[in-house]
Image (spheres, rainbow, N blue to C red):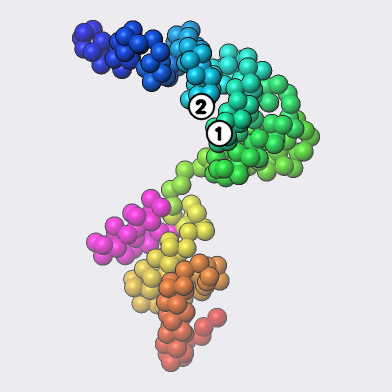
């Protein structure tokens, strides 16, 4: 068993390559990442520093060094290597978030805000960015912005289950289980009221399943009121069905609100 574990150790091949050529940057980088991943900090730092000594301009090693310094609470060194990455033209979500986190630790909240806002421009769906912006705004006494940031962070962490319910509903329709399909679609709409495809399927399924078309009419009208400009094909179908249902009800002498 021990032999099997050694055979599967991903560092062995790179250690052999490093022993054959101590300037082999690819092996050094892989070993630095490997030891960082398994939390062997001293070995990780040794290979990171070795790589930077060979190539101070390396984007990969400067990223590793910035992270390594941050986790060692050496925030000024972390900033030094983030600045180096910036000079090299490496302006990414990673660097902006690392800048923000580092400036929080240094209690420079204005700069932290600047970089987390840059990070938000890169990825507006990252809940961690909003959480950290909340912390920053709170320190800056911008309480309304802090509250909004925390609320957005919570919202983005909620599981997106509306699409799961949508697919469950479509499976039921394929088996001609309209009532069960409607049930799944309604749960999906409850999870995300902005999902136009789910509301469209509820309207059509209700239209197919129930003889009384007033319920379907209600859903079609709701779709039109909320999503008219979102999907031209769906909207055209909805408008046609509203017209047809209203005409049928009128002929029957039934009142339509």
Which residue occupies the foreground of this view, 215 or 125? Answer: 125
**Residue at left 41%, top 52%?**
163
* Up/down of 177 relative to 234, above or below: above
* Up/down of 90 relative to 166, above or below: above
Quadrant of the image containing the N terminus: top left
Quadrant of the image containing the C terminus: bottom right
**Residue at left 63%, top 40%?**
118
Q: Is residue 189 left or right of residue 124?
A: left
Question: Label 1, on which residue?
Answer: 90
**Residue at left 43%, top 67%?**
200
Q: Is residue 51 left or right of residue 142?
A: left
> Which SS class for mark 2?
helix
Identify the main secondary structure in magenta: helix
Residue 195 forms part of the magenta stretch: no
**Circle 2/circle 1 CB separation < 8 Å:** yes
Q: Using the rendered view, name the quadrant where residue 89 is placed.
A: top right
Q: Is residue 204 left or right of residue 112?
A: left
Q: Residues within 10 Å of mark 1 (few under 14, many from 20)?
A: some
> Which SS class for mark 1?
loop
Please tell me the numbered disc located at residue 59: 2
Residue 36 drawn at (x, y percent)? 45, 16
The answer to whether residue 54 of the structure is visible from this angle is yes
Q: Using the rendered view, name the quadrant where residue 108 is placed.
A: top right
**Residue at left 79%, top 34%?**
141
Please tell me the numbered disc located at residue 176: none
């Amino acid at each position: 068993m021990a032999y099997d574990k050694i055979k599967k150790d991903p560092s062995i091949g790179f250690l052999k390559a490093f022993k054959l050529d101590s300037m082999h940057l690819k092996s050094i980088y892989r070993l630095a990442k490997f030891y960082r991943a398994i939390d062997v900090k001293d070995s990780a730092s040794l290979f990171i520093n070795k790589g930077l000594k060979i190539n101070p301009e390396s984007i990969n090693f400067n990223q590793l060094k910035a992270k390594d310094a941050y986790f060692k609470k050496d925030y000024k060194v972390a900033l030094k290597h983030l600045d180096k990455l910036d000079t090299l033209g490496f302006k990414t979500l990673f660097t902006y978030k690392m800048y923000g986190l580092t400036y929080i630790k240094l209690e420079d909240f204005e700069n932290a805000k600047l970089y987390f806002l840059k990070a938000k421009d890169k990825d507006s769906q990252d809940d961690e960015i909003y959480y950290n912006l909340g912390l920053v705004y709170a320190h800056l006494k911008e309480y309304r912005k802090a509250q909004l940031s925390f609320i957005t962070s919570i919202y983005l962490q909620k599981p997106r289950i509306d699409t799961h319910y949508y697919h469950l509903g479509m499976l039921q329709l394929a088996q001609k289980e309209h009532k069960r399909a409607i049930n799944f679609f309604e749960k999906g709409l409850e999870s995300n009221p902005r999902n136009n495809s789910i509301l469209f399927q509820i309207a059509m399924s209700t239209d197919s399943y129930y003889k009384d078309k007033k319920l379907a009419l209600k859903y079609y009208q709701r779709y039109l009121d909320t999503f008219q400009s979102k999907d031209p094909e769906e909207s055209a179908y909805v408008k046609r069905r509203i017209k047809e249902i209203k005409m049928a009800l009128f002929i029957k002498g039934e009142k339509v609100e």
